[in-house]
Amino acid sequence: MAFSNRVRSALTTTVLATAATGFLAGCGSEDEQEQVAYCTNEDGEIVDDDYCDDDYRGGGGLFFLYLGAFRPGLPVGSVLPRGGTRVDPRDTAARQRYGLPGTGKVSAGQRVTGGIGSGTGGGSGS
């Protein structure tokens, strides 16, 4: 069966528009996937929220805001699984990029939606 160029063009446009809509719908659900933030040490162990306050000036050690599809309400001392996103708590721009407040303390188990870091992956903030 032969189609004219006009019919072919209309079919191609319809197919591409349908595919794009499905793709964007899938992306939208991932962008809105709820993430949970915890303050962790470099080994992924949950520590007191004060260590990830952007103005914390305490002793040695590296601390991160760790975002992922974690269960809320985990206690201090729990070790989070790999696969989340680490954000330097002193990096205001990175915090905001990942849907966190730019400054201040982030409460353990705080839910975060949207932002670049809302998908899965092992990226790390600067």
Image (cartoon, rainbow, N blue to C red):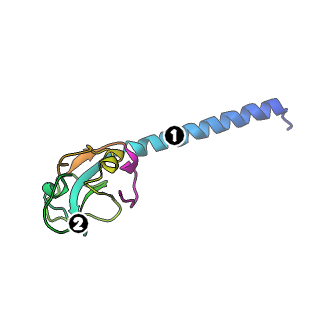
Q: Quadrant of the N terminus?
A: top right
Identify the element where label 2 is drawn.
Answer: loop
Q: Secondary structure at mark 1?
A: helix
Residue to which mark 2 is pinned: 62
Give the residue type that dot 1 points to. Answer: Leu
When asked about the image quadrant of residue 79, the answer is: bottom left
Q: Is 2 placed left or right of 39 in the picture?
A: right
**Of the pair 31 and 60, the residue shown nearer to us:** 60
Prevailing SS of the magenta stretch: loop
- Residue 87 locus on image (x, y percent): 31, 56
Mark identifier at residue 24: 1
Q: Quadrant of residue 6?
A: top right
Magenta-drawn segment = 115-126
Q: Is residue 27 left or right of residue 33?
A: right
Residue 48 in the figure: left or right of residue 80: left
- Give me the C-alpha separation between circle 1 and circle 2: 37 Å
Label 1 packing within 10 angstroms: few (<14), some (14-19), many (20+)? few
Q: Position of residue 57 (x, y in %)?
A: 15, 59
Which disc is residue 50 wearing?
none
Q: Nearer the viewer, mark 1 or mark 2?
A: 2
Horizontal placement of 9 versus 93: left or right?
right
Label 2 environment density (alpha carbons within 10 Å; few <14, some 14–19, many ≥20)? few
Quadrant showing the C terminus? bottom left
